[in-house]
Image: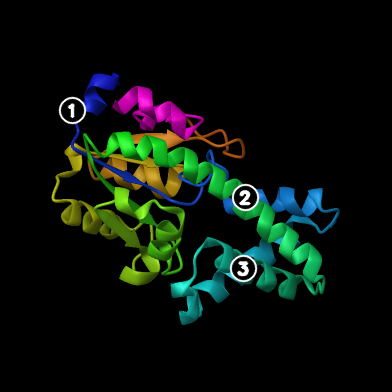
Amino acid sequence: MTSNTFRKCKGILFDYGGTLDSDGERWPDRFYALYEKAGMEFPREEIKRAFYHAEDRCYADSKVRALGLRALMAAHVQWQFEALGVKDRERERALADTFCAVSERSMLRAARLLRRAMSRYRLGIVSNFYGNLTAVLTEAGLLEFFAVVVDSNVVGIQKPDPEIFRLALTQLGLLAHQVIFVGDSFERDVIPSKELGMRTVWLKGPGAGLVSAGEADARISSLTDLEALIL
């Protein structure tokens, strides 16, 4: 598909985690690397279990809905350490700080693209998140770019359920064929948005499997690559 086809669209929907805050790196994969770098030699399955324990706590705790990124990740890592049976506040803070620093750099870079894109497109986000995505975007200075923010824990629907995408399209005021979806998950982002008729851009991270990109309209390895397609 040519870039001219994308440029005929009127809106862009983005995923958040792994898309705006990194180049396709899933949060669990980022934590695997952080634990390894910190010399905390837990089996990957144990880290995965701890990560999803923290995920469940974030979804269930109503106080999380007010948290920006740094406060969120302080709680997230604390709950991971709780699940791992680790009591080390220094390492806990270091892991959260390193995670946030990478995300903040990525979001600062994304802001430059979003500022240019919003002059041509209506922008929105569809994310499986904890109810505090608006707070995270506000803290990062990104909220101003988005006409629509659909947070799964606010609306009670998660990707890949097509209803969460339909909700975002309705709020954008656009039809599916007029919208581009950009996300790092082939299963949760590309497949459902494509089935609804959206144009799709797969931000394929280093940890992505050997899924064929044939069903995506385009594949990129960095969010900066999107500029050539849409502007």
> Who comes first in sequence, dot 1 or dot 3?
1
> Who comes first in sequence, dot 1 or dot 2?
1
> Who comes first in sequence, dot 3 or dot 2?
3
Task: Look at the numbered disc 2 and give the secondary structure of its residue.
Answer: helix
Instruction: Provide the residue designation for mark 2.
Output: 101
Residue 102's x, y, as percent?
Answer: 61, 46
Instruction: Provide the residue designation for mark 3.
Output: 76
Highlighted magenta segment, given as a residue range: 213-231
Q: Quadrant of the C terminus?
A: top left
Residue 82 position (above or below residue 216): below
Instruction: Provide the residue designation for mark 1.
Output: 8
Q: Residue at x 51, y 47 (%)?
A: 21
Residue 171's x, y, as percent?
Answer: 18, 56
Q: CA distance from mark 1 to mark 3?
A: 40 Å
The kind of residue on which mark 2 rests is Ala
- In this view of the protein, which residue sits in the foreground, 6 or 78? 78
The kind of residue on which mark 1 rests is Lys
Residue 187's x, y, as percent?
Answer: 44, 46
Q: Residue at x 43, y 51 (%)?
A: 16
- In this view of the protein, which residue sits in the foreground, 122 or 178? 122
The kind of residue on which mark 3 rests is His
Q: Image check: 109 left or right of 13?
A: right
Q: Image check: 227 left or right of 96?
A: left
- Find out whether the residues at labels 1 and 3 contact each other: C-beta distance under 8 Å: no
Q: Image check: 120 left or right of 132?
A: left
Q: Quadrant of the N terminus?
A: top left
Q: Is 221 a magenta residue?
A: yes
